[in-house]
Image (tube, helix red, strand yellow):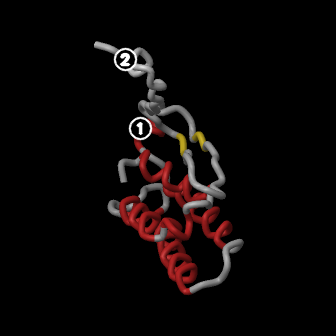
Amino acid sequence: MASNADAGQPPQSSVRIGDVRGSAFSIGGTEVSNSTVNHGSAETDAAAAGPTAEQLLEAVRDLRAALVRLPRSAERAALDAELDSAAGELEEAGEEVRPGLPARLLGVLERWAPLVDSVSAAAALAALLTSSGG
């Protein structure tokens, strides 16, 4: 079987991403702040159990602080209200994250993706949420 290079065509490049744990990253796009956030080894019991309420609360607060830099809009106000509600739940939660909250926060990030796609704090929060299976 002949390859693309043998047929006079340039070789096709490909990207393969294996198992990514405990990190957040973004690829491509214009004016995107590409960053990697590592929250420890996936091999530890803490990482296997998912993030604590305190870790999620810190990530939500970081995202809310980053949103201040965005222009004021009805969308930003609605997102901030949803994050404020989640922060309140996390403050009351103590050590344990209430079931359904990680999935709800992921839904918030997906719904408001056009607003937060260039905010690295959103990628960090998403990484924490996906590490919990949310």
SS at mark 2? loop
Which label sits on residue 66?
A: none
- Residue 82 coordinates in the image, percent (x, y): 48, 76
- Location of the N terminus by quadrant is top left
In this picture, is 65 found above or below 31?
below
- Residue 61 coordinates in the image, percent (x, y): 61, 65
SS at mark 1? helix
Which label sits on residue 3?
A: 2
Look at label 2 and name its amino acid. Answer: Ser
Badge 2: few (under 14), some or many (20 or more) residues near its Cα, within 10 Å?
few
In this picture, is 23 found above or below 3?
below
Write the residue at 62% across / 56% down: 30
Write the residue at 49% across / 54% down: 126
- Location of the C terminus by quadrant is bottom left
Q: Which residue is mark 1?
A: 48
**Going by the picture, which residue comes out furthest to the right?**
69
Residue closest to the eye, 69 or 28: 28
Report the side of 73 relative to 111 (left or right).
right
- Residue 25 coordinates in the image, percent (x, y): 56, 45
Badge 1: few (under 14), some or many (20 or more) residues near its Cα, within 10 Å?
some
Write the residue at 46% across / 64% down: 109
Look at label 1 and name its amino acid. Answer: Ala
In this picture, is 10 found above or below 99?
above
